[in-house]
Each structure stands twice: as C-alpha cells, then as structure tokens.
Image (cartoon, helix red, strand yellow):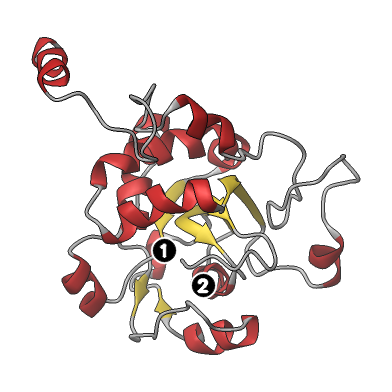
C-alpha cells in the first residue's frame, strides 16, 4: 500500500536482531540465516529433529507416548528465535503473530490438513487480564484464517491459576498443570481432530494437560503446532 511505502521511507523499519534493514518479518538477512528452521526429518510424536530419517518416532516417544498424537515446530528455540518469541509474549509485539502463523502453515501443513479445528493453549483469566492478550491465540487466529480451518478460541479453558513453568523440572511442570484445563462444552469438540497452538514446546507438560482434557471431552485426536521447540539442556528462559 502507498501509505505503508511512504511510512517506511520516513521511518525505515528496524530489524529485531539489531542488524541491517530487515528483509521480511523484522529479521535481517543474517538473522534469517541463523534461525534453525526444522525443514528436515522430525519425530512425528514430539517434532524433535533427526539428522536422518530413522522412522516415524524417536526413542523417547516410543518408550513413553505423549498425550497429544503428533507435534510439529517451525524452528528450534535458541538465541536467535528467542527474542522475537519473547517480544510477542511479553512486549506487546502482536505484529509478529502473523509471521509466526505463516511459519506454522508450512511446518505443520500435514497436521493442518487433517485438523477439523484449531484451538490455542489458554491462559488463566487473571494472567490474561495482566497480559491483555494470549500469545497462542494471536498466532492461532491468523493461522486459522489463512488455512480456512475453523477456529475454536474458547474450546479449552484454564480453570486453575498455575505458577509459571519457567525453571521447573519436567515432573514439576506436570504437577503444576495437573487438572488445570477444562472443556466447558464437550459438544464443541466431540469427535473432532483438534490442532493445539502454542508458542514454545519445552517438556510438553502444558500441551499434554490440554490434550488430556480435550480427549476426556470426546476429541478424536489432538495434535500440537508450536513456533519453536527447546532442545535438551538449552538453558534458555521462556
């Protein structure tokens, strides 16, 4: 649009990473090259990257299947991807959400094609009041619109206020969200294949809590799509 071009000339857009003028999505060319997109073979169960394609599931998922059926991540959560994800989550950068939705439309294409509806991982009302928006919903809404998939923003609610998951062990995260999620109207999800949307996958405890609630309400299948997934021992704050 003409007004956007004129605005960019007056106030040239700044890259998210502090580099030269961004090419697209707020990233400089150097930052784009450093984002570790998961375009190669990944585990069907948790979305972890494989160096080669050994089969559908990694050893961890074969040993202990997740409550959700399959997961995909657009990229790895590292020093490059961390900053824009946190800017969306904590710094009101809602303009980044459509970019993340486009990433998911590619990385989770197969799951989207099979989904009957898209639903965000919910925030508790008190946290939503403080933050003013749910970052998962801000990503899920444009993803549903661009793929033509029905959007169910309130299919799942967080009834119990939980402490932040940051800094907790895997077992601690599971205890923290145990019984926290609920489906207010099971008729809305009964028999449906639901694609859950969140920003980051760490241990999967939150997504599994959501998946258990949806399946208990009658959902036929629950898959997960996230912007980024954490590697073991990454040591990065979410």
Q: Which mark is residue 75?
A: none
Name the residue beneath numbered marker 2: 206
Q: Where is residue 98 drawn, in percent x and y?
A: 33, 37
Q: Does residue 33 sit above or below 215 in this rendering?
A: above
Q: Residue at x 21, y 67 (%)?
A: 131
Among the 4 quarters of the image, the one containing residue 182:
bottom left
Is the Cβ of the residue at disc 2 closer than 8 Å to that at disc 1? Answer: yes
Name the residue beneath numbered marker 1: 121
- Direction from residue 113 to residue 44 in the image, left or right: right
Which element type, helix, strand or loop, lies under badge 2?
helix
Among the 4 quarters of the image, the one containing residue 184:
bottom left
Which element type, helix, strand or loop, lies under badge 1?
loop
- Direction from residue 76 to residue 25 in the image, left or right: left
Q: Where is residue 173 drawn, in percent x and y?
A: 55, 82
Q: Where is residue 136 drawn, in percent x and y?
A: 37, 56
Mark 1, Cα crowd under 10 Å, few <14 / some 14-19 / many 20+, is many
In this view of the protein, can residue 116 be seen by the observer?
A: yes
- Direction from residue 5 to residue 118 in the image, left or right: right
Q: Does residue 97 sit above or below 24 in this rendering?
A: below
């Amino acid at each position: 649009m003409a007004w956007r071009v004129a605005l960019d000339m007056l106030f040239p857009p700044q890259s998210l990473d502090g580099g030269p003028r961004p090419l697209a999505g707020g990233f400089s060319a150097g930052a784009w090259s450093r984002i570790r997109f998961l375009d190669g073979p990944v585990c069907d169960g948790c979305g972890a990257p494989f160096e080669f394609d050994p089969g559908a599931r990694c050893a961890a998922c074969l040993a202990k299947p997740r409550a959700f059926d399959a997961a995909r991540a657009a990229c790895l959560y590292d020093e490059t991807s961390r900053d824009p994800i946190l800017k969306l989550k904590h710094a009101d950068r809602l303009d980044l959400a459509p970019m993340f939705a486009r990433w998911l439309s590619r990385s989770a294409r197969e799951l989207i094609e099979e989904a009957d509806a898209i639903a965000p991982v919910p925030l508790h009302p008190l946290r939503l009041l403080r933050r003013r928006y749910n970052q998962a919903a801000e990503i899920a809404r444009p993803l549903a619109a661009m793929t033509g998939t029905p959007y169910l923003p309130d299919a799942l609610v967080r009834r119990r206020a939980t402490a932040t998951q940051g800094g907790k062990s895997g077992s601690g995260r599971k205890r923290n969200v145990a019984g926290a999620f609920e489906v207010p109207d099971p008729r809305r999800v009964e028999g449906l294949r639901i694609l859950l949307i969140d920003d980051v996958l760490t241990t999967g405890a939150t997504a599994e809590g959501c998946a258990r609630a949806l399946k208990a309400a009658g959902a036929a299948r629950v898959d997960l799509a996230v912007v980024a997934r954490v590697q073991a021992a990454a040591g990065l704050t979410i």
